Structure formats: C-alpha cells, structure tokens
Image (cartoon, rainbow, N blue to C red):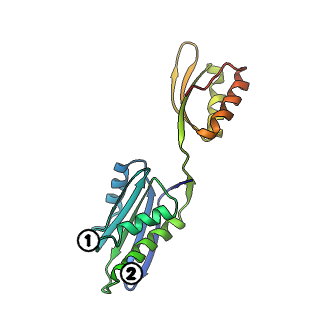
C-alpha cells in the first residue's frame, strides 16, 4: 500500500565538501509538484535536482548534473520508500571535489532516501465514489459514520425531503457503511455506486 507525506520534511548532509539539502512534500497534482519545486529551489545553489510521483505520472530532472545521476536516483528513492503523491528536491552546493557518476547517484538518491525515511507518512487510500440520500435529522450521524471509516463527503445537496450526499470511500469500507446506514435508518438509506 503506497504512502504519502503528512507535511514537508528536510534532510541535510555534507559529502566530500559538497552540501546537500533534500526537501520533500506531499502533492495533489502535477502542477502542485512543479510549484513545490519552484518554491523550494535555491537559485544560488550549483544544482536543484528533483523528482516527483503522482499515481502513474512522474518526472525527474538532473539540472546540469551528468544524465541519470540525480533525478532518476531521487525517483528511485521515492519508489523504494513506497511513496506516491510526493515531490522531492535535492539542492547541491558544489564543494570543489568531484564525486563521479556513482558518487553523485549515491549522494542524490541517498539524501532523498534519508529525507523520506524520516518523514511522517500516512497510507494512501484509493476511494470509490458512492452516493446516498438521508433526512435532515440523520445527516450528522451519516457524516460521522463516513468519517469514522476514513471516507470523505464530497458534496451535499439539500432538497425538500432531505440531503443527497456524494461520498468517496475505500472499497473495503463500503459494505460496513451500508450495514451501519441501514441500521441507522431501518433500511431506508442505500448506498449507490
């Protein structure tokens, strides 16, 4: 099961006189990943290498380092930590000592890996859209049951007879919620996919 970060994190390291700072954070889209990278890059640094992963989409950049020595190792660290919906920027200030291609890959990948290892994570749950209708008096209890099962209330539409809810819920929790709502309403509330 993949994980994402609960917030931004940072890791600092010095390798053969070069300073490395790895910054990682959660993202909700590809555009948010690019914004994170632009916001955290340091234009005074020698290199701002990065990678991000959002579901099936991913990108990486070596930012002037030899091809495949920075962006790909950072992306490999994201995947090794079983992370998704995450962007990582590793900033390098060159210290005068050449690291070689293997040394660069170890430095960038290692900094990203250590940053993600120490980061507070939360499990990513893939949710299925479902809907239901309830009376005004049942609304608070329905929302409580949805939240207890890790679901989300995406939209609520008030009608003359009650409330129509658009929900997102983990596949494994749908049957449990259906049973709870049936018990709550004597079988009247039914989840629709």
Return the x and y of residue 6 as percentages of the image width and height. 52, 55
Other-residue count near label 2 (Cα within 10 Å), few / some / many at <14 / 14–19 / ≥20: some
Give the structural element (helix, strand or loop) at label 1.
Answer: loop
- Left or right position of 62 against 85: left
For the residue pair 75 and 162, the one nearer the viewer reads as 75
Report the number of discs. 2
Residue 140: name its quadrant. top right
Q: Are marks 2 and 1 in contact (CB under 8 Å)?
A: no
- Left or right position of 11 against 121: left
Return the x and y of residue 112 as percentages of the image width and height. 45, 68
In the image, what residue occupies the spot 44% across and 62% down?
Answer: 24
Q: Which mark is residue 64?
A: 1
In the image, what residue occupies the spot 32% across and 85% down?
Answer: 98
In the image, what residue occupies the spot 53% across and 67% down?
Answer: 117
Residue 46's place in the image compared with 136, above or below, is below
- Left or right position of 176 against 11: right
Name the residue that disc number 2 marks: 103
Residue 134's place in the image compared with 152, above or below, is above
Residue 124's place in the image compared with 13, above or below, is above
Other-residue count near label 1 (Cα within 10 Å), few / some / many at <14 / 14–19 / ≥20: few
Query: Can you say which quadrant of the picture contains the C terminus?
Result: top right
Q: Which mark is residue 13?
A: none
For the residue pair 151 and 77, the one nearer the viewer reads as 77
Give the structural element (helix, strand or loop) at label 2.
Answer: helix
Label 2 to label 1: alpha-carbon separation: 16 Å
Return the x and y of residue 115 as percentages of the image width and height. 48, 68
In the image, what residue occupies the spot 70% across and 21% down?
Answer: 185
Return the x and y of residue 156 as percentages of the image width and height. 52, 26
């Amino acid at each position: 099961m993949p994980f994402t970060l609960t917030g931004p994190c940072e890791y600092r390291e010095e390798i053969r006189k070069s300073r490395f700072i790895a910054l990682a954070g959660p993202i909700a889209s590809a555009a948010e990943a690019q914004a994170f990278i632009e916001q955290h890059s340091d234009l005074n640094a020698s290199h701002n290498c990065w990678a991000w992963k959002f579901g099936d989409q991913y990108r990486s950049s070596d930012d002037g380092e030899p091809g495949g020595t920075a962006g790909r190792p950072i992306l490999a660290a994201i995947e090794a930590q079983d992370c998704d919906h995450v962007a990582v920027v590793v900033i390098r200030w060159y210290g005068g000592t050449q690291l070689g291609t293997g040394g660069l890959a170890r430095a960038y990948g290692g900094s990203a890996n250590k940053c993600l290892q120490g980061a507070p994570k939360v499990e990513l749950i893939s949710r299925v859209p479902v809907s239901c209708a309830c009376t005004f008096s049942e609304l608070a209890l329905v929302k409580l049951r949805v939240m207890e099962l890790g679901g989300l209330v995406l939209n609520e539409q008030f009608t003359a007879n009650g409330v129509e809810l658009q929900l997102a819920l983990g596949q494994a929790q749908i049957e449990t919620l259906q049973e709870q709502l049936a018990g709550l309403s004597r079988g009247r509330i039914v989840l629709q996919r």
